[in-house]
Image (tube, grey):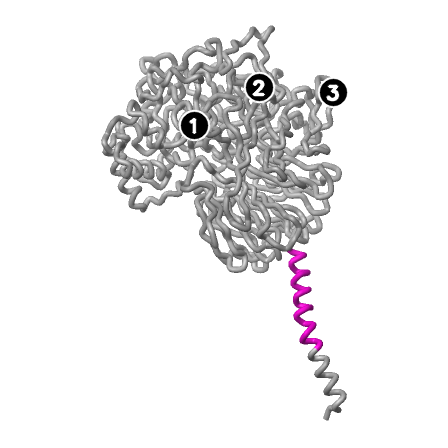
Amino acid sequence: MLSRKRRSLIIIGLFVLGVLLPVINKNSEITKVKAFASPFPNNSSPIVLNNGNRFVWVVNPDNNSVTRIDIGDERNFPTITIAVGREPQSLVLSADDTKVYVANTVDGTVSVISTATSQVVNTIKVGTEPRAVVLSPNGTKLYVANSNSSSLSVIDTKTDKVTKEIRLSAAPDGNIRPYALAITNDGDFDDNDERILVTNFLAQYRPNDVRPGFDDGKAGQVFIIDTARELLTDTITVEPMMDTGFSSNGSAIKRIAAGPSDRPNLVATGAFPNLLNSIVIKGNKAYLAATGSQPDGPVRFNTNVQSLLSVIDLQSNRDANLTTNMNFGIQFEPDKFDLQNNPLTRFVTVPYALAFKKTSNTGYVVSSLSNMIVQVNLDDQGKGSINAPKAMGDPGNITRILVGKNPRGIIIRNDDTRAYVMNYVSRDVTVVDIVNNKVIATVTSAPQPTDQRSQFIQRGKELFNTSIGPIFDGQAATFKGQGRMSNHGMGGCFECHPEGLSDGVVWMFPDGPRRAIPLNWDFDKKNPSIERVYNFSANRDEVQDFELNTRNVSGGAGLIRLANNEQDPMVANLTPLANTGRNPDQDAIAAYVSTIRAPISPFSQDDLDVKKGRKLFEKAGCVTCHSGSLWSTAIRDFSPPPAADRIKDGQILSVLKKVGTLDRNKTHEIIGTGATMGQPSRGDDGFNPSSLLGVYANGPYLHDGSLTTIDQVLNNPNHVGTNKVLSSPKKRAQLIKFVLSIDDRTEPFPLKK
């Protein structure tokens, strides 16, 4: 038996242990939480690292999968690939590295992957077209940006259930498309005292200030969400850059005529931040790498698209007025090449993502269309610079690193020695030594297509998403040292047609103000032989006609060429030759365009108001212009080129309809480019009827983009008539809801002619 003294000691010991265990457990939990709480802010990304810097996780949007790459010894890079939902775009690891959350855009879900089993263990339904996910600093909540339902879903990471939907508007609004996320981190263990930053993908008109065609006619938007109240508390306006450093020869909007080529009228150009694909926090500032849109004429590659690095002061929640044009100065560089003779003198085209080192003010911006990352440095104020030349003769000090095809994401290791770059089109990850700024490995994350047709489409996707394209060989001395798609990589299809859709910009074209058209309108997905006539003026009848944009707007040599690699001069709209079949790469672009899907509407096809609105759509006569599988009567009914008697002034008259939307009193209703710049725009013969496929996310509306809602479109009786349906508020609302519900799921009306 135990002695009384020993029993007393045991009792005392048990008592002490009983007192200390909760403290020990509590301290262990605190240690655990501290390990979870990253000292750095977080931002949405298609590529992430685990806490131990052992594994890279990356999405494969075209393969509907996620790949884990073991980066441990930097020799073998073994991979595991896990099937998820359709079109995964963003992912994040849970705070304890046990789960991976993946936003599946087409399915409207978040897949939950167990890192222990590498299997999907849960699927969470969220909003329409989720594009981005971000985790709170201590890992208690996951925020999901639903780009087509104007909202954020909040997920409790303990239960993996949606607890709230944070609305960015009273109802789903196609003008509000949350696209990228970042969250502050004040370093404590409370996730309810942070701010979520949400980018609106496309720039917007200011309230009561609709000015299509103006360089400052739109502005970027970043929404601020308070995590405690879980609601929108502020909207930051990201201002246009009033002087990009580039000048144009004249101005359509300012009525300044172009001067002669030897004595041009040099007019300073501005640009507004558009295509807000990402946002990153560094210190007390947030950084947005955006495509700068400069829509005023004359249209030309070296003024119309720029690459802006905008800065937000998080103390005041305002634009810090520290915007940099990352393209300025590159025009002063001589042609340079890497060891494989690839051209290095490339503009920073479509800056898609950005990441900073943890221990310095150095970062890297992903130039998506130019297939590279570029070093960016912040000064004491927080303004960014890529150290471009300041004038001709100044060598500058730009650090460019060529990566894979169409890079869209970057993550930097915690020790600041490596960066990992997600390349969308080449379906791989580039491993970069950012101490010596060199590529050390390329790891395949997903397989390329194997059948011939899919390979052909993939080639078209590559060319659509590049500003470089095939490098010149043989002759073509005029464009020596460049790719064919633009002048030194300064332009590409994606800039005006992100994901094949529309940038929402009204460009001052030779016909007048013309909104960029989403390309999901162009082909019947089930029968690609059904194709629309192109442009609001019906002046093109093939995708291949846009070879002329590559040459005349982007400054490239183009793809259609002679046997000696020089440009084929016989390329024109409509006549005298068809452009289809003249170059396999140009045909591949058309094949890719035929696959572009419509944005998914947040409105259900089974909604009772949508069903009633469908009947009203036909009753009101909307089918007169908007019927058939493409929801437009402008279907090409001939094999190019058209007969001469079908063309008048370069337009196919048979598809034009006088829809009553031309208003000569509008300041911007003028020709924007060419010898007749500033004269009245085209439109007297009518316009090519727009498609309504995916119209919810494809505003603004009309040829000149002057209306922002379908309700405004219905206010013009010259356009929509005077049917009594439109005078009934209830029926009008049902009609609008149906129109906004139209996407690839909607059964079309028979084609009217």
Q: Is residue 366 above or below residue 532?
A: below
State the residue position of label 2. Answer: 269
Q: How far apart are marks 3 and 1 (CA)?
A: 40 Å
Q: Nearer the viewer, residue 47 or 406?
A: 47
- Is 468 on the left-hand or right-hand side of 712? right
Q: Which of marks 1 and 2 is nearer the N terminus?
A: 2
From the viewer's side, name the closer residue of 232 and 181. 232
**x, y percent for residue 112:** 52, 54
Q: Where is residue 712 in the image (x, y as percent from the top left)?
A: 36, 29
Task: Pick whichever of labels 2 and 3 is earlier in the sequence.
Answer: 2
How many neighbours does mark 2 have within 10 angstroms: few (below 14), some (14-19), or many (20 or more)?
many
Q: How far apart are marks 1 and 2 (CA)?
A: 24 Å
Numbered badge on residue 394: 3
| Residue sitting nearer the eye, 501 or 18 | 18
User: Three-letter amino acid code at disc 2?
Assistant: Thr
In magenta, the rendered stretch is: 16-36
Q: Based on the picture, tell me whether residue 69 belongs to the magenta stretch.
A: no
Above or below, 656 against 616 in this view is: above
